[in-house]
Amino acid sequence: MTLEVRKRLNAFIRMKGLRHTPQRNAIVEAIFASDEHFTPDELWEKLRGTDTRTSRATLYRTLSLLSEAGLLQEIDLGDGQTTYDPNFLEKPAHNHLVCVDCGKILEFEDDHLEVLNECITRRLGFHSIKQTLRIEACCEELRTEGRCPNLIQARLKRQRLPGKKR
C-alpha cells in the first residue's frame, strides 16, 4: 500500500469518527497488496486463508468505506458482478479491455480518448469529471491457436469466467 493511500485512508477514518481494527487493516492490506481487480467473493477467499476473524459484513463495510473515500472504484465489467479496481487513485482515467473468452482484464490509457471525451462533454454543455471505457473483445490467441493460457490458468485457479454474449 502506498503512503498516499495510507494517508488518505487514515484522514478519512478520522473524519468519519471510526477507528482502525485488525480486521479492517487485514482487508485493506489484502486489497492494496496488488493492483488486481477483484470481486468481494474473490477477496473473501483470499482473506479466509490468512484471517479467520473477519466477517463478510466487515468486508462489505470496508469496501463501502474505501469506495466512499475514493480509494477503491466499483467497475462494471459486464459479468453481472461488482468488481473493484484498487488503482484508480494512481490512474484515474484508465479504461478496461475485457476478454469475453478467458476473463483477462487489461487496463489501458489513451490521450486521444481523454481529448475526445472532453470535446464531447463540452459540446453537450458538461464538464467531465471522470471517464472510463469498457471494451469487450474475443481472445485472439484462442481463435488462432485453439488455446489460451489465460483461460487455462483461470480454470485451474477456479476464477470466474465471463458469460458468453455472442
Image: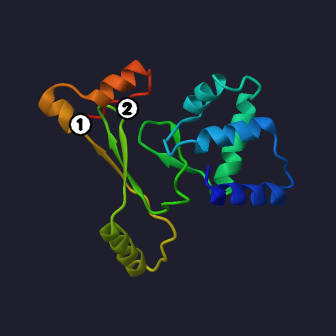
Q: Is residue 121 left or right of residue 86?
A: left
Q: Residue at x 85, y 48 (%)?
A: 19
Q: Which residue is mark 2?
A: 162
Task: Work out which residue is located at the far left of the displayed protein and give it.
Answer: 144
In the image shown, does 152 or 67 lie closer to the viewer? 152
Tag count? 2
Task: Judge the density around disc 2: few (<14), some (14-19), many (≥20) Cα neighbours within 10 Å.
Answer: some
In the image shown, does 66 or 126 lie closer to the viewer? 66
Q: Is residue 127 left or right of residue 151?
A: right
Three-letter amino acid code at disc 1?
Answer: Cys
Q: Is residue 64 above or below residue 42?
A: below
Q: Quadrant of residue 125?
A: bottom left
Estimate the x, y position of residue 63 in percent, counting from the top left: 66, 43
Q: Is residue 34 above or below residue 3?
A: above
Q: The C terminus lies in which quarter of the figure?
A: top left
Q: Earlier in the sequence, mark 2 or mark 1?
A: 1
In the image shown, does 126 or 45 lie closer to the viewer? 45
Estimate the x, y position of residue 76 in percent, counting from the top left: 47, 46
Estimate the x, y position of residue 144 in percent, counting from the top left: 12, 32
Task: Judge the density around disc 1: few (<14), some (14-19), many (≥20) Cα neighbours within 10 Å.
Answer: some
Q: Is residue 121 left or right of residue 4?
A: left
**Picture disc at residue 155:** none
Q: Is residue 94 left or right of residue 34?
A: left
Estimate the x, y position of residue 102 in percent, counting from the top left: 32, 31
